[in-house]
Image (tube, helix red, strand yellow):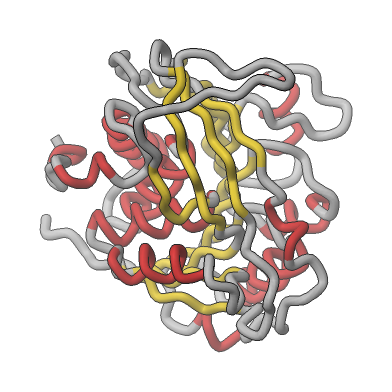
Amino acid sequence: MPRLRPKGLFVGLATVDILYAVEEIPGRDEKISVPAQRIFAGGPATNAAATFAFLGGSAELVTAVGRHALASVIRSDLHERSVRLRDLASSGREAPPVSSIMVYRSSGERTVVSANAAVFSGQLSPFDARRLRDFSILLVDGHYMPLCIAAASEARERRIPVVMDSGSWKEGMGELLPLVDVAICSDDYRPPGCRGTKDVLEFLAAQNIRQVAVTGGASPILLVDQGKRGRVAVERVRSVDTLGAGDILHGAFCFHACQPGTTFRDALARAARVATFSTQFPGTREWMRTFRRGWTAL
């Protein structure tokens, strides 16, 4: 069956990511030098949109970028990845959020420091509901929460599936959850009163979210699909860099979920293959150079 070219709207955070590969994280009052650096656009919704577009979808990102010189890093990367940008902070002069990232050479694990949505908090233009016209799917990442709620509310009215990506509980999420159709969260996600993954799955299912999944890196993805539990195995590889793997999984899931005849589990499995493949390369874009787009359909 030929693939469709779905149209996805991604709402949330855009950052400038500066990545360094290190042997060890420097201690207090210590400096280290590394042979190279990588600079690219980041953020959950941004990386998901870039992945969605790379796999063959039409992607639009609604976020805050502003007019600062550093914003050109984000704009250039999105243009190169064929992601349409809708900047709701187009008059903002502040530097966009900058993420300083150190990746351990030995394991691919990373440490991140970022201001995230705090930079443009309270400065966004209102969400234009017309942006949702003819979209196949909406992803919200919980950053700029009022914006995510407005988009999800409009999508619910138009019967457009709403996918939520979250790695942590954020203020206002209680208002967002009733508008979500699919929640795919990391195993760090802890709603109030939840101590473990079992609690999280039960909590989200109780919000009438029909499809829920919790990812755990190389561990199997645990899922609940309209009350039925299951799991998706994740291939073990030697990871070079795990940065953005969850974001990539979300973008790939959105693309595959829009394909006719694809079940929730199948979309997760195909998305997991993309995300796993990406961890074998540094950064969040390098994997695209060698990835075969038909590989996940096998």
User: Does residue 17 appear anywhere in the picture?
Assistant: yes
As displayed, is residue 86 above or below residue 54? below
Q: In the visual, does 236 lie left or right of 96?
A: left
Tell which of 230 and 30 is nearer to you. Answer: 30
Tell which of 125 and 254 is nearer to you. Answer: 125
Residue extending farthest to the right is: 193
Give me the residue at 81% from left, 24% from top.
194
- Where residue 32 appears, x then y in whole percent? 53, 23
- Where residue 207 appears, x then y in whole percent? 75, 45
| The quadrant where residue 144 appears | bottom right
Give me the residue at 41% from left, 67% from top.
8
- The quarter of the image holding the N terminus is bottom left
- The quarter of the image holding the C terminus is top left
Q: In the visual, does 239 lie left or right of 5?
A: right
Q: In the visual, does 205 lie left or right of 76?
A: right
Give me the residue at 55% from left, 53% from top.
163
- Where residue 188 appears, x then y in whole percent? 67, 26
Tell which of 61 and 111 is nearer to you. Answer: 111
